[in-house]
Amino acid sequence: MVDIAFRRAERSDVAAIVGMLADDLLGSNREDTRARLAEAYLTAFAAIDADPNQLLAVMTEAGRVVGTLQLTFIPGLSRKGALRGQIEAVRVARDRQSGGLGQRMIEWAIDQCRKRGCALVQLTTDRSRHDAHRFYERLGFKQTHLGYKIDL
């Protein structure tokens, strides 16, 4: 078995990350992998990479990016001033799904949150992602809130 590694994403990983974000029904409607939008993704990457409360991470297998997620460390006054870890944009390459890599990636993310001193790890997932709901519940996450968004 090839070793899996985790690391901070690099600028050269952006195309692979966006490709994974776009590689499902929801993502294909939200993302655009055409070259004309590459600059917008690179600008967003630069902002994420420069922010000490952001960690855009990739999971690699034999040097190939096979997974990604973004961790945001959120300081707050609630919960006695607790730091929260927010997991977003979790993806595993289509040809590597259902092999336990998603679980390894989430466990790695939770460990990063512990190391940063987070008191809580939270995430959101689209209502239509029923498989993801079962996956997160199996890993111990509980559905405790109802979320709302507004497009601007």
Image: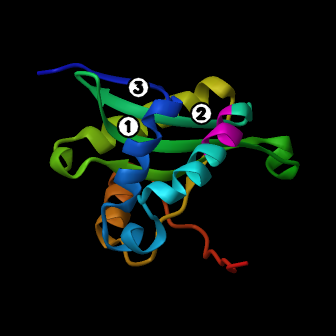
x%, y% of residue 141? 46, 54
N-terminal of the pair, mark 1 or mark 2, is 1
Residue at image position (46%, 31%) is 12
Residue 23, picture quadrant:
bottom left
* Label number found at residue 105: 1
Q: Is residue 78 above or below residue 46?
A: below
Q: Which residue is drawn at 31% across and 66% down?
A: 24
Residue 55 location, quadrant: top right
User: Which element type, helix, strand or loop, lies under badge 2?
Assistant: helix
Mark 3 to mark 1 CA distance (whole Å): 8 Å
| Distance from Cα at disc 2 to Cα at disc 3 | 14 Å
Tag 3 residue: 6
The C terminus - image quarter: bottom right
The answer to whether the residues at label 3 and label 1 have Cβ atoms under 8 Å apart is yes
Q: What element carries label 3?
A: strand
Residue named by callout 2: 113
Task: Say if the magenta span includes residue 152.
Answer: no
Rendering coords of residue 47 (x, y %): 71, 41
The image quadrant where one finds the N terminus is top left
Q: Is label 1 in contact with label 2 (beta carbons under 8 Å)?
A: no
Q: Can residue 7 be spotted in the picture?
A: yes
Q: Is residue 101 left or right of residue 152?
A: left
- Residue 48 magenta: yes
Q: Residue 134, image x and y in percent?
A: 32, 63
Q: Can residue 119 be seen in this view?
A: no
- Earlier-in-chain disc, 2 versus 3: 3
Distance CA(mark 1)–CA(mark 2)? 13 Å
Residue type at mark 1? Answer: Met
Magenta residues, start to end: 45-49
Q: Compare marks 3 and 1 and give the one earlier in the sequence.
A: 3
